[in-house]
Structure formats: structure tokens, C-alpha cells
Image: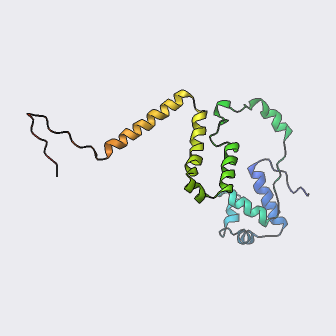
Amino acid sequence: MEVLAHISCYNELVAAIRARKDQLGLSNDALDDLASMPRGWAGKVLGPSHSKGIGAVTLEAYLMVLAFDLVMVTNRTKLRAMKPDYRGRVTAQLRANHPLTKAAFSRVQKILSERGIAALKAAGRLAYISSLGGRSRMASMTPQERQELGRKAARARWANQRRLPSRRRRPPPHPGRPAPTERP
């Protein structure tokens, strides 16, 4: 593998791509055409003004057209300088009890492959499979979290009830009171 450039910052990346383009004898217009970029794009990206940046699409196109790869290596000097500032991941933010574990996913996949979805619907097993995610989620929650989730669901049900027209019959009028009038 031939090393074409040592790149440690964005400006060095732009300079290396420009040098590779020149090494292959390509003009900016030819590079734009081969990379399927708009006319004048290479001048904006590789020119002195850097009015456009190298994004994912441009980088992948240039990697292909200019026939080079990027290789990431450890810079031990930078690592030594940065190591004291590194902090570990906050374990409270990790999703160790993810609702859909690999084991649950493989069980569902096995059931789906043995039967078809139509057969599962006919046997009433699709609802069971759908409930696995909810059961796993509930198992990973604390009692307080489950209680709050239940309250939230109840509030949503009651709010829904208030919006729906009442299906109950009105009670008969109380003796001595006039009957309520119907609204049109």
C-alpha cells in the first residue's frame, strides 16, 4: 500500500485531494464530470476559498474517482495529550435492559420462520408475539415507572371517553322536575 499523504486536519485533507487530482492529471471540470457533481463544484471544494465543504456524498465520490482510501491510525502523541480528558460512559444512560433483546428477537424469528404470519394470525399467536415487547418493557421498569405509565394510560382513556358521544341512556326525570329537552 502506497502512502499518498499524511492527513491530520480538514485543510490537509483538501490539500491531499487536490494533490491527488493533479497527480492524475484531472481538471476541475473533469473531476466534476466523473464524480457526477455540478459544474464548478471541485473549484468550490478544493479552491482557495473553500466556499463549499466536503460532505459525505462528495467524499465518497472523490474516494472512488481519485482511487484512494482513508486509513485511520492512532496518533500516540495526541492520545497522550487527550487521555486525561476522557470520561467513561455514564452507565445510567446505557440501555442494558432493552425491551427487544437478542434472545427475544431470535425467539420471535424462530416462531415466524416455523409458521407464516398468516398461520400465526389464524392461531391467534400474532397478538402473543406482539405482546413480547410490552412484557419485556414492563419487566425492565421499576414499580414507580409502571405506576406512572398506568396513570398516563388511564388519563388518555378518560380523555378519549369525554370526546366520544355518550352511549348511556339518560336517567328518567326526577319526579317534580321537568324533563330535559333534546338538542337538535
- Where residue 79 appears, as percent x and y from the top left, is 81, 36
Q: Nearer the viewer, residue 97 or 61?
A: 97
**Which of the 4 image quadrants contains residue 32?**
bottom right
Image vertical order of residue 33 relative to residue 91, above or below: below
Residue found at the very far top of the displayed protein: 144
Residue found at the very far front of the displayed protein: 123
The residue positioned 78% from the left and 56% from the top of the image is 15
Image vertical order of residue 8 relative to residue 64, above or below: above
- Where residue 2 appears, as percent x and y from the top left, is 91, 58
Q: Nearer the viewer, residue 5 or 48?
A: 5
In this image, 137 relative to 104: left or right? left
The residue positioned 67% from the left and 65% from the top of the image is 41
Is there any visible trace of residue 53 in the rendered image? no
In this image, 154 relative to 52: left or right? left
Image vertical order of residue 105 relative to residue 147, above or below: below
- Where residue 53 appears, as percent x and y from the top left, is 67, 56
Q: Nearer the viewer, residue 1 or 183?
A: 183
Residue found at the very far right of the displayed protein: 1
- Where residue 115 appears, as percent x and y from the top left, is 65, 57
Q: Quadrant of the N terminus?
A: bottom right
The residue positioned 74% from the left and 32% from the top of the image is 86
In this image, 160 relative to 64: left or right? left
What colour scheme governs how the chains and residues are painted in the rendered image of this protein?
rainbow
